[in-house]
Image: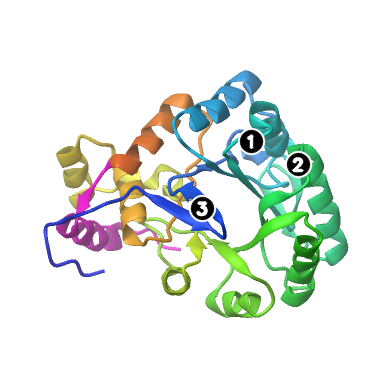
Amino acid sequence: MTPDSEQPVRSSGTFTLGDLPVHRLAFGAMRITGPGIWGPPEDHDEAIRVLRRAVELGVDFIDTADSYGPDVSEELIARALAPYDGVVVATKGGLTRAGPDRWAADGRPAHLREALEGSLRRLRVERIDLYQFHRPDPKVPLADSLGVLVDAQEAGKIRHIGISNVDLRQLDEALAIAPIVSVQNRYSLLDRDDEDVLDACTARGIAFVPWYPLAAGGVGAATGAIETVARAHGATTGQIALAWLLASSPVMVPIPGTSRIAHLEENVAAAEIELSAAELDALTRAASEVRPDR
C-alpha cells in the first residue's frame, strides 16, 4: 500500500456476502465461552448482554463455530438473538476439541454432515446464512469436504459457503469446487503473512474475514507511529489497528471478539475512524518494524 495523498480513507461501510449486506465491522463470538475456548463462560448473563449490545450498536454479522465451547457459543447466540431479525449469523465446522486450547481438524464428510445438523439445531434455524469450512484436513481431499457443503447448499440448509485457514493454492482449489463468498484467515496489522490471500480476495470481491485482528492485544505494545496516530484521533491503539484493517481493503470484514461490553463498544467505535492515506502508509511501515516473529 503506497498512498500518496492526505485525503481520508473511509473505514466504515458495508459489504455484501453473496446477497447479504452487512456492516464491515462484525463480532467474533469465540471469547464468550470459558477459558481456553472451553465450556461455559464465567458470567453467562454478561455473555448474553454482550451479544445483545453488539446488535444494539449496529453489528449485523456475528461469527461463531461449533467448536467454540464446543457448542456453547452457538447456544448462547440462539438464546440471546434468535430469531435473528436483520442479523447474519455465520458458523463453522471442521474442527474437533479434546480440551482447553486443543483443536484438531476433521474434514470427513460424515463429520461435517453431523456438525452442520448440530449447528442448525443449536442456532434454531433451518438454513445457516454462511457456513464455513473451519480448516482443511490434510487427511481428507478438499473436494470431499467442500462437496458436503455444496450438497447442503443445494438442499437449502446453507445459504452461502465460506472457507477458513487456507493458502492461495487451497483458495483456488476451493473456488473450482464451490461458490465461495468468504475467506477467514489469521491477519492483523502485526500479522500479514496471508497478504497474497487477501489480495486474491480483493481482486475477486470475496469477503476477507480476519480472525485474531488485534493479535490478542499485541498492537497495544506497538510504539511510534501507531501511538502517534492513536493520539491524533483520541483513540486506542486497538481502535487504530481495526481502522487500518477496514481501510486496507474494501472486502475486509474484521471480527474482533470480547466478553466485555466496554471492550465491545470500543471496538465498534473504530468503524468511525477515518485514517488519511499518509497515516495508513506510516502505520504499515511502522508495524512492519514491530511485527513479532512467527
Q: How is the image coloured?
A: rainbow
Callout 3–callout 1 Cβ contact below 8 Å: no
Q: Which label sits on residue 84?
A: 1
> Decide: marks 1, 2 in contact (CB < 8 A)?
yes
**Between residues 4 and 178, which one lies in front from this camera angle?**
178
* Mark 3–mark 1 distance (CA, rounded to whole Å): 23 Å
Numbered range of the magenta stretch:
273-294
Structural distance between the alpha carbons of marks 1 and 2? 9 Å
Q: Nearer the viewer, residue 95 or 54?
A: 54
For the residues carrying marks 3 and 1, which lies nearer the camera in this image? 1
What type of secondary structure mainly makes up the magenta span? helix
Residue 282 placement, left or right of 112: left
Residue 272, percent from left and from top:
30, 40
Label 3 SS: loop
Q: Residue at x 26, y 69 (%)?
A: 1
Kindly tell me whether residue 133 is visible in this rendering.
no
Give coordinates of residue 216: x percent, y percent.
46, 44
Residue at left offset 63%, top offset 40%? 36
Residue 210 forms part of the magenta stretch: no
Residue extending farthest front: 19
Tag 3 residue: 211
Structural distance between the alpha carbons of marks 3 and 2: 25 Å
Which of marks 2 and 3 precedes in the sequence?
Answer: 2
Say whether residue 134 is left or right of residue 156. Answer: left
Q: Amino acid at mark 2?
A: Val
Q: Residue at x 39, y 46 (%)?
A: 218
Q: Is residue 285 magenta?
A: yes
What amino acid does circle 3 point to? Answer: Trp
Would residue 99 be visible to someone looking at this image? yes
Give above or below for 260 relative to 269: above
What SS does tag 2 mark?
loop
